[in-house]
Each structure stands twice: as structure tokens, then as C-alpha cells.
Image (cartoon, coloured by chain):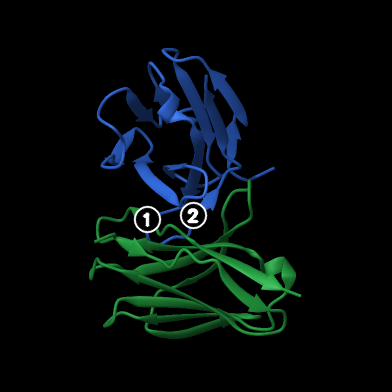
Chain colours: A green, B blue
Amino acid sequence: QKEVEQNSGPLSVPEGAIASLNCTYSDRGSQSFFWYRQYSGKSPELIMFIYSNGDKEDGRFTAQLNKASQYVSLLIRDSQPSDSATYLCAVSSSASKIIFGSGTRLSIRP
Amino acid sequence: NAGVMQNPRHLVRRRGQEARLRCSPMKGHSHVYWYRQLPEEGLKFMVYLQKENIIDESGMPKERFSAEFPKEGPSILRIQQVVRGDSAAYFCASSPGTGDSPLHFGNGTRLTVT
């Protein structure tokens, strides 16, 4: 079992709709969870981080964490073509190293 | 520019040569991570360092690869006797503290082995 799992996609969403990206992790001791966006040929950039169960909102982005289910998600409201990218879920393991999933490719169609 | 600085941006090496990748963390950051990324794949953890200390190198191959983060100067990822399979993008990221802190990434070094 991979430490951090994501559906590779591509996930295609019409412009203006909600994009939902999911991630599961295996280490129950994980405490910190991050979402990064990576455009092709570029470095990852941080979108959000979440530490507690529940929802955390920042503009059009909402991160959701459920530690009991070992599940973290990212919702993007009012999707824009500029949101088309690969989204990487990252989890801080109990050993403090940060492990990334393989990423979900998101495509927003006009 | 107070961001994470990596150099060189592009590095071409012939098989058997050595590659040295450098990373200067953001000001005030004392933790450095190195990741490798193959095309169309995610970031694979290699090593996590603090100043003068390797915290976790479980993702780094035992042979040919080494990393350091000296008291003064940048962190160095060194690959000896490179092979074609080492061709990848190598990203460095830094943080101010433990794994609870988000990582800030450099622009990466694209290594090509010919």
C-alpha cells in the first residue's frame, strides 16, 4: 500500500463547476496535511494546509480532513481554466518527513 | 530574492560523471528536503536534513547518492557515477521547523544524463 494515494486522473471539470480532489494516507500518526499545485515544468506551490479534522476554507479552496477515515480532500469552487494543473497531496508522517502522492491531473474545460 | 534557491537549473552529465546539486533554503529555514520527480510522476522523498544533521535518508539510494547540509553554505545533493536512470528533476524544499510546517520549494534542477 502506498503511503499517500491519489487518483491520477485526468479529472475533467467544466469551467465554473466544483472540482473535488481526494487523497488517502496510510500512517495513522500523520498530523499535518498539505495541498500543492504544480504546473507542467514548474515547481510545486502551496495552496493550503490543514491540521485538524473538519473543513478549512481559503477563497475558492476548501480543504477537508477526516483522520478517522485517513482521508483528505480539496474542493475548488468556480473552477477556472487557470486551475488546470496537477494537484499534489502531501502528508507529514509520524517520523516528520513529508510524503507526496503521485498527484491528480485536473483539466478545466471552457 | 528570499526564496529557496537551487542551482544549476539545468545540468547535463555523461554517464559515469558526478553531479552536484545545490540548494540554499529560505532565510530563517533550517530544515531541507530533497525530492526527485520523473516526468508525469509525483515527488519521491529522498532525504530530510537539518544543519549538520541527516534526519531521514530512507528515500535515498544507498549507492552513489549522498547529501549534506553544512553549518555554513548550501545543502548539497551529490550523485556519483551517474547513470541514465538518474535523469530527473530534483527539487529542494525548506521549512522553518518540523514536519508540521509547509514546505517551500525551489525551482528545481533538471539533470540529464547522456
For residue A87, side relative to residue A15 (left or right) = left
Specify the label residue B103 is tagged with. Answer: 2
Q: Quadrant of residue A91?
A: bottom left
Instruction: Indicate the chain on which mark 2 is placed.
Output: B
Of A40 and A45, nearer the camera is A40
Of all chains, the one bearing label 1 is: A
Query: Residue A7 appears at what percent x and percent y?
Result: 43, 68
Vertical placement of residue B3 versus A94, above or below: above
Residue B45 visible, this orientation:
yes
Compared with A5, B55 (above or below) is above
Q: Residue at x 47, y 86 (%)?
A: A55
Task: Give the percent coordinates (x, y) of residue A73.
Answer: 45, 77
Is residue A17 shown above or below B107?
A: below
Give the answer, above or below, for where A59 lies relative to A9: below
Counting from the top left corner in percent of width and height, residue A60 is at: 65, 81
* Residue that appears at 40% across and 59% down: A101
Residue type at mark 1: give it: Ile
Mark 2 lies on a secondary structure that is loop
> Do dots 2 and 1 share one subunit?
no
Label 2 to label 1: alpha-carbon separation: 9 Å
**Which mark, residue A98?**
1
